[in-house]
Amino acid sequence: MTHGISAIRGMNDILPEEVVYWQFIEQQLRALFASYGYIEIRPPLLERTEVFSRSIGVATDIVAKEMYTFSDRNGENLTLRPEGTAGCVRAVIEHHLAYKKACRFWMMGPMFRYERPQKGRYRQFYQVGVEALGLPGPDIDAELIFMSQRLWRQLGLSDDLVLQLNSLGDSATREKYREVLKNYFITHYDQLDEDSKKRLETNPLRILDSKNRELETLIQDAPKITQFLDETSRQNLKTLEALLTEARIRFVLNSRLVRGLDYYDGMVFEWETQLLGAQGAVCGGGRYNGLVECLGGESIPAVGFAIGMERLVEVLKAKQTMFPICPPDVYIVRVGERGGEEGLLLAEYLRDELPFLKVLSYMGEGGFKQQLRQADKSGARIALILGETEIASGKVSLKFLREEKPQQIFSKEEIKTILMSYFS
Ligand code: HAM
């Protein structure tokens, strides 16, 4: 016996029962983005590695440990995108999309990170992201958060997600803060774990993000970035807080929120849930005013966020939100020599005449009873039957599968009229 080939660890098949959740969310998102004036952009999945190393930062976990990087047949160093922002910015610069005008984009698709797979953390996962370029904020920052909050409301999740907010200031702020933080942790060097000791040199801000409970007090007592913020960042954060309060969006100021990508400056945020255990961040984003210039464009302010689709679907499931797979409306049962052909033609006729109708035709050699059983299992409400008698008279029998009503024979046109009034 041969063994089947399984999917790559951390890369999931999204099966039909789950796809209905995805489709529902995607539908909501498309309408939501349109209502805020965002348009879709689709950068490729593969980019030159430097697009990510230059933007996300070589000292981050993503670039240092998690990228799917390889040389192609030409010897070019390429990487499967670990996130969407860098590729979007590369495209914006290459096609001069933000030249002297603001632009708002949304994107949807798979990302790849070589992380240790566990519930809510995968090696291929999907993000839906938005990026607004050319706008300094904080009004657009507030609007982005309003937009995400509106989505949670539409999905019935308003009470399940908490907004965490922080500001990382400008580059001078971070430079100064990095030194202060480094000195603080050096004075407590013996209490640090191995991971944090490594981060002390490469990226001390990330120590604040540690999940190690033994470091809890040490991190709590560390100096806060808010004490070092530049005037513009401080003002922007204050205005944003006021706008959120005005819009009745609850938030928690979290000075430990540093995000895992180096391109951020100014305001950063995450929406978190308690429903998913360790991987509670459903959406994250913030300002990245230096990124366009860092990737070779002119200096343009920018802000955005991305939602993790798998995690959002998990939240909906944890809330027991049910999305049943949509059954067909009509199932075509056909027997006899010409049944197969007539059945296919009848299905096409119905699709021409009633484009909203979902029609499933039996295929294969099964007998009448077997076909009726399949019709019942499919969840369809009506079976249309084409037997010898029906075909000889050019008619079709209609059987209600979920109601106690007599089976009746009709012309094709009558069937069309009945289905039209029944399903509209
Ligand atoms: P991020 O926080 O790295 O930000 O990812 C955004 C979201 O993607 C996370 O909140 C989480 O829901 C989901 N996610 C991340 N990694 C995984 C994983 N391994 N498995 C499953 N879900 C995951 C960014 O990627 C930024 N580009 C967001 C952004 C856009 N900032 C500005 N514009």
Image (tube, rainbow, N blue to C red):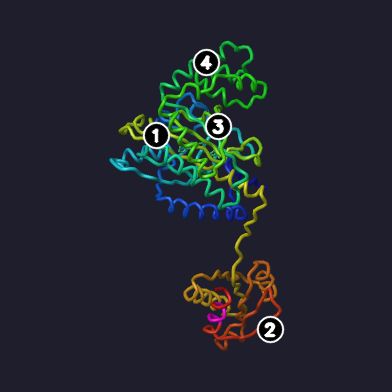
Can residue 216 be seen in the rendering of this structure? yes
Of tags 2 and 1, the one toward the viewer is 2
Of tags 1 and 4, the one toward the viewer is 4
Instruction: Tell me the distance, in whole angstroms, between the alpha carbons under discs 4 and 3.
Output: 22 Å
**What residue do we see at 32% from left, 38% from top?**
93
Going by the numbered disc 3, the residue's amino acid type is Leu
Per the image, label 3 sits on a secondary structure element best described as: strand
Label whose residue precedes the other's in the sequence (1 or 4): 1
Q: Is residue 315 magenta?
A: no
Q: Which residue is mark 2?
A: 406
Per the image, label 4 sits on a secondary structure element best described as: helix
Label whose residue precedes the other's in the sequence (4 or 3): 4
Residues at circles 2 and 1 in contact by the CB criterion of under 8 Å = no
Q: How many marks?
A: 4
Instruction: Tell me the distance, in whole angstroms, between the alpha carbons under discs 2 and 1.
Output: 66 Å
Residue 48 marker: 1
Of tags 3 and 2, the one toward the viewer is 3
Instruction: Tell me the distance, in whole angstroms, between the alpha carbons under discs 4 and 2.
Output: 81 Å
Ligand 1 within 8 Å of disc 1? The answer is no
Of tags 4 and 3, the one toward the viewer is 3
Instruction: Tell me the distance, in whole angstroms, between the alpha carbons under discs 3 and 2.
Output: 66 Å
Instruction: Tell me the distance, in whole angstroms, between the alpha carbons under discs 1 and 4.
Output: 33 Å
Q: Which residue is mark 3?
A: 253
Residue 300, image x and y in percent?
Answer: 34, 35
Magenta span of residues: 415-419
Q: Looking at this view, is 151 or 260 the one in front? A: 151
Going by the numbered disc 1, the residue's amino acid type is Arg
Residue 118, image x and y in percent?
Answer: 63, 37
